[in-house]
Image (tube, rainbow, N blue to C red):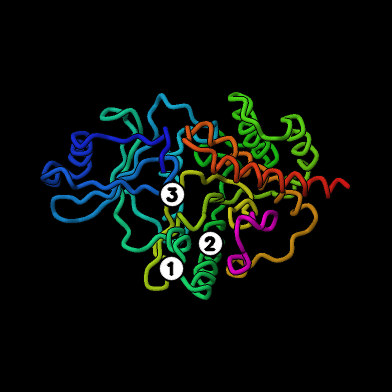
Amino acid sequence: MESITKNWQSVATLRAMIARAYGVAEVPEGDDFAEELGHGWFNVAYAITLRDGRRVVLKIAPPAGVQVMTYELDMMRNELAALELIQAHTTVPVPAVEFADTSGELIDADWFFMPFVEGANLGIETHERALTDTERADYARQLGVLNRELNQAVGPWFGPLAGPGFATWREAFLTMIEGVVRDGEALSVDLGHSYDLVRELIARDADALDAVAEPRLTEWDLWDSNVMIRDGRIVAIIDHERAFWGDPLMEAYFTPLDLPAYGDSTAFREGYGLGELDVDARRRRRLYTLYLVLIMVIETRYRGHEDDKQYDWARERLDELMAIYGKVDA
């Protein structure tokens, strides 16, 4: 995926990064040792073959001077913290961090190396219709089980993993979503609805957030494209940069409860064990869907997309959600 947030590097710089991480002896010969893994939207990632033949992945944060959304600041450091937490408190399979550099000495961004995960990407396999309906549902159930385990980790506060934290989920979430709204206003992104209306809807349901009393590790971005599979099993969950201490009901695969365009979450919910939602939980869930859809509309202007495909799709989802809010009001 093309995006101005992708921090591509020259072959010479990649060599220097390999040398720092693994030693000069592992710097490969020739110039064909790196291949971009191109399905991500934000960071750039390379599959790299070291001199000894071992494959690793190099992940690089956006350049220091590129404007990103408020919630995207220092996301790679957040991912490093998330990986450490997941490995310490769960059995969920995630890649190990083999080397991380946040010094800014070689390049103007954070970066880290991890092992290459042998397997297929569930999102790509689903998009290419390489799986049967039965296989797809089985993976969704597995993902539900793993997502629930991730959510069992309890944090010291609500909000970013590394802080600053908030004493209540209401304060944390309202800060998060207000940051998104202000990002949209800063670039005059057309939502098709007034920013005042968006704020009114947020304020109207804010009291429903008070039911969340315990901060839980929340991945939020755990879509199929962040799942690696092999031989019928999920072998790794990748891309943890958007994790925070919050409400597990905010997880990505609960979004279809509001908007079916995001897929069928039935099998996932079976694996997760989510029952019927009460009225306040439904109100919270709509706020979380609003947060996601706002980001999907607004981020297109920060990414510098060359076409309006995602913007148009996300605008349709926002229109659908606003219609739901209208019915609730009626």
As drawn, is 9 to the left or to the right of 22? Answer: right
Total residue callouts: 3
Q: Amino acid at mark 2?
A: Glu
Q: Residue at x 66, y 45 (%)?
A: 316
Circles 1 and 2: CB atoms closer than 8 Å: no
- Kindly report the distance in space between the C-alpha atoms of the residues bearing marks 3 and 1: 23 Å
Q: Nearer the viewer, mark 2 or mark 3?
A: 3
Up-down relation of residue 201 to residue 283 (above or below): above
Q: Earlier in the sequence, mark 3 or mark 1?
A: 1
The location of residue 144, given as percent across then percent down, is 55, 64
* Residue situated in front as seen by the camera: 137 or 125: 125
- Kindly report the distance in space between the C-alpha atoms of the residues bearing marks 2 and 3: 17 Å
Q: Secondary structure at mark 3?
A: loop
Q: Amino acid at mark 3?
A: Asp
Query: For residue 172, what is the image quadrant?
Result: top right
Up-down relation of residue 197 to residue 235 (above or below): above
Query: For residue 267, what is the image quadrant?
Result: bottom right
Q: Amino acid at mark 1?
A: Ala
Query: What residue sits right under mark 1 in the picture?
Result: 130
Query: What residue sits right under mark 2 in the picture?
Result: 149
The location of residue 218, given as percent across then percent down, is 56, 50
What span is colored magenta in the figure?
Answer: 255-269
The location of residue 214, given as percent across then percent down, is 65, 50
Q: Secondary structure at mark 1?
A: loop
Q: Main secondary structure of the magenta part?
A: helix
Q: Nearer the viewer, mark 1 or mark 2?
A: 1
* Residue situated in front as seen by the camera: 316 or 31: 316
* Residue 261 shown in magenta: yes
Query: What residue sits right under mark 3 in the picture?
Result: 239
